[in-house]
Image (cartoon, helix red, strand yellow):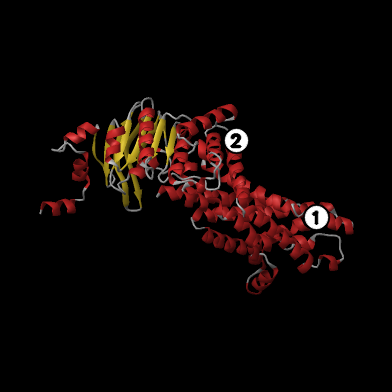
Amino acid sequence: MNPIANIKTIMKRELGGYFTSPIAYVFLVIFLLLTGFFTFTIGNFFERGEASLVSFFTWHPWLYLFLVPAVGMRLWSEERRLGTMELLLTMPITNWQAIVGKFLASWLFLALALALTFPVIITVNYFGDPDNGIIASGYVGSLMLAGSYLAVSCMTSALTRNQVISFILSVMICLFLILAGYTPVTDLLSRVASPVVVDVVAAFSVMTHFEGFQRGVLDTRDVVFFASVIGFMLFTTGVIIRNQRAG
Amino acid sequence: MINVEHLVKAFGPKLAVNDVSFSVERGEVLGFLGPNGAGKSTTMRMITGYYPPTSGRITVGGHDMVADPIAAKRLIGYLPENAPGYADMTVHGFLKFCAELRGLQGDARKRAVNRAVELCFLEAVLYQSIDTLSKGYKHRTCLAQSLIHDPDVLILDEPTDGLDPNQKYEVRNLIKRLGENKVVIFSTHILEEVEAACTRVIIIDRGRIVASGTPAELKARSPEGRLDDVFRAITLPDTVKAEARA
């Protein structure tokens, strides 16, 4: 049977699952309120006096730290809790079709949330004359960042039937991905370690790779970094799901 | 149709299923009998491809479950224990989803859903979400899912669990009817069910097959001709047996 059709079927169900429960609406409202709050109040969007969305994108790694695991924590733990995992994996589909289908559904949902922030683009274009290329690249980076966090949550949700544990584990791993390249941490590290070590550690951080996107630089290495985090985490999810049943 | 050879499943040091072999042909209804924790569900999970066996071989319709799982799974309809379902979906949405994963599209999908709904008497709750259903309806929704692609092989883990006596009677008749031209394997610990629906019985205890035969053959083993006595004699732990003798 057609793998694309199977992935689409699973995606449709998963996406539908967000909207039949209040999760989707609660998430969208909170996400939009928080992005607005951080951009305009804490980020001093107006006081900066520059036509850019720097104050908008800077907060994304921190905002996603809690919001993305909240979206991803149920992906597999809910299947295990309800017992539907047994149903799903005895269907004539492969494990990776189920994993990719579920991941894409949540990613699409996050993309929708991100798309709903379009008023900031209108605002900045109304008041000034920003470089919309840089804004577009910021959005691409933000989406890749969300995808990486989501893949981490996908992996942690496969580990446990408890959504709270899945959430906390995922926040911890994502926090590490931020802190490894967060300037205060790298400064501290450079006092005790050689610059090479600092660079190696920082290379694992989403901060280092998200920066380029915010400046409007679409570097292949950054794209490859996010893509490989997603690939690696989804692969790990597959291994976990297989091993759980091997006993 | 189904061939199981020297099936073993280990969870750590514990052997849940220990060297189980049997084969079932079309037109047979095989009852799996055994005390709780005997390895019935584990065996069924291996046949349906959910658990990979530790060792041994399973073929369904000639397809090896480990080497060619997709082809083998396509032939099987499966009702897992406790009849799981996606709580937030409606009965109709759930059946549609399962039909699509079975490769049914358009008109074929609509017909399949309607047929399964009729077979399991689900018309009244079709647009109700699964978490609002009574246990009986929830069970029948999951049963409908296993029938949706009109499979050659039906594997039902405790299909009458949680149903009221009328529903039990209906499901038993359904199993008998389906068994005429399919392979049906179902597990239960209700002995009368075995007599009513099975052409063959396998009794499993502590991971091993301890008895197998037609219900009549098994009954003949007890002086009073009662299946209960046979079941108790075979599956009671040795310590209890020793106490009973003393």
Element assignment for label 2 = helix
| Residue type beneath disc 1 | Pro
Q: Is residue B208 above or below residue B178?
A: below
Element assignment for label 1 = helix
Q: Marks 1 and 2, how far apart in space?
A: 35 Å
What is the chain letter for disc 1? A
Q: Is residue B125 rendered to the left or right of residue B52? A: right
Q: Residue at x 33, y 43 (%)?
A: B40
Q: Quadrant of the N terminus of chain B?
A: top left
The total number of labels drawn is 2
Residue A205 shows in this picture: no
Q: Residue at x 79, y 51 (%)?
A: A136
Residue A72 percent across, percent down from the top left: 59, 54
Residue B134 percent across, percent down from the top left: 46, 46
Residue B67 percent across, percent down from the top left: 44, 35
Q: Could you tell which of marks 1 and 2 lies nearer the N-terminus?
A: 2
Do the residues indicated by labels 1 and 2 lie within the same chain of the protein?
yes
Residue highlighted by disc 1: A119
Q: Residue at x 51, y 38 (%)?
A: B124
Circle 1 crowding by C-alpha within 10 Å: few under 14, some 14–19, many from 20: few
What is the chain letter for disc 2? A
Which numbered tag is attached to residue A5?
2
Q: Is residue B61 above or below residue A236?
A: above
Q: Is residue A155 above or below residue B91?
A: below
Question: Which of B140 and A226 lies nearest the eye of the viewer?
Answer: B140
| Residue type beneath disc 2 | Ala
Residue A24 percent across, percent down from the top left: 64, 53
